Amino acid sequence: MIDPTAKIHPTAVIEGNVTIGANTTVGPFTYISGDVEIGEDNEIMSHVVIKGLTKIGNGNRVFSFAILGEENQDKKYHGEATQLVVGDRNVIRESVQMHRGTVQDKGITQVGSDNLFCVNAHIAHDCVIGDNVILGNNATLAGHVKVQDYVILTALVPVHQFCTLGAHAFIGGGSTVAQDIPPFVMAQGNHCSPIGINSEGMKRRGFEKQDILAVRRAFKTLYRSGLTLDEAKVEIAKSADEYPAVKQFIDYLNNDVNRGIIR
C-alpha cells in the first residue's frame, strides 16, 4: 500500500508487499522489493535499493546508492526470513550498507534513531545500533556488534565481530577495534587503546562537571592504577550511587563486556 500523499518518481521500481507512508518521497531509479515497510516523511533519493524484510521508521533521509535490507554476507545464511529494522530521523549517506540479521542470533539488525551514517559506512548482520550515533566515512561494523547511544566512530574504523562499544565512546580515525570499549572512553590506534575520556562530548550532552570528574577518576582507576579488572570494578563501584555516569560505567563493565575491554 502506498499512501496517496507519497511521491514516487515514475522511474522507481516498487514490487512485492511494500508499504510507503504519508509524505514520503522516492527518487528516480530507486528499487524497493519484498516485504518492506517505510513510514512517513522519509526522503529516499535516487538509485537506492531497499529489500525486505525491512522496516524503516519516519523522517529518515536516504542518499543515493545506499543499500538497505540486502542479504547478509554470513556464509551460514541460507535465505531465512531475517530482518532489518531502522528507526526515525536517521541520515543515511551515499553507499551505506545495512544487512539483514541471521537466525544464529536474534534474526534482526537493529538501528535506532537520530543517527548519522556517513559515506560507505557498513552495518553487518545482527548489529544493534542505539541513538545519536555517528559512523564516519568507511566505518565498518562486522556482525553482531553493539553500538550504544552517542558513540562516534570517525573515518576508516573497522570493528571486530561481537564487540560492544559503550555509550559516549569516541574512536579516532583509522583505528582498529578488536575488543570492547567502555562508556565515555576515547580510543585510538591499531589495535586501539584507551587515551582518556570523552570529556568534550560529555560537556556537549549536558553532563555536570562533577560527573565528568568522577568518570575521569573511574577511567584512571581502571587504566592507570595497576589494579586488576576485578579490583578496579570494586573501587569504581564505590562512587556509582553518587554519580549516575559512573554507575553507567560500572554497569557496562559488569553486564555488557563481550570480548574483553581494550587495555
Image (cartoon, helix red, strand yellow):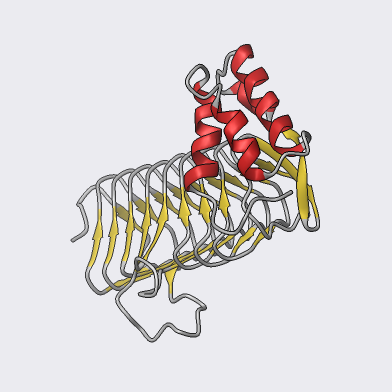
- Foreground residue among 262 and 234: 234
Where does the N terminus fall, quadrant-wise? bottom left
The residue that appears at 70% across and 47% down in the rendered structure is: 154
Q: Is residue 76 above or below residue 240?
A: below
Q: Can residue 154 be seen in this view?
A: yes
The residue that appears at 78% across and 58% down in the rendered structure is: 191
The residue that appears at 25% across and 74% down in the rendered structure is: 16
The residue that appears at 44% across and 64% down in the rendered structure is: 126
**Image quadrant in which you'd find residue 44:** bottom left
- Foreground residue among 234 and 54: 234
Q: Is residue 80 toward the left or the right of residue 3 in the image?
A: right
**Image quadrant in which you'd find residue 227:** top right
> Given the current orientation, which residue lies at the most extreme right position?
189
Q: Is residue 242 toward the left or the right of residue 156 in the image?
A: left
Q: x, y percentage for residue 246?
A: 55, 27
Q: Is residue 207 toward the left or the right of residue 153 in the image?
A: left
Q: Is residue 180 toward the left or the right of residue 34 in the image?
A: right
Q: x, y percentage for residue 172?
A: 75, 45
Q: Is residue 144 above or below residue 217?
A: below
Q: In this view, does 107 lie above or below 232?
A: below
Q: x, y percentage for residue 108?
A: 36, 64
Q: Can residue 173 be seen in this view?
A: no
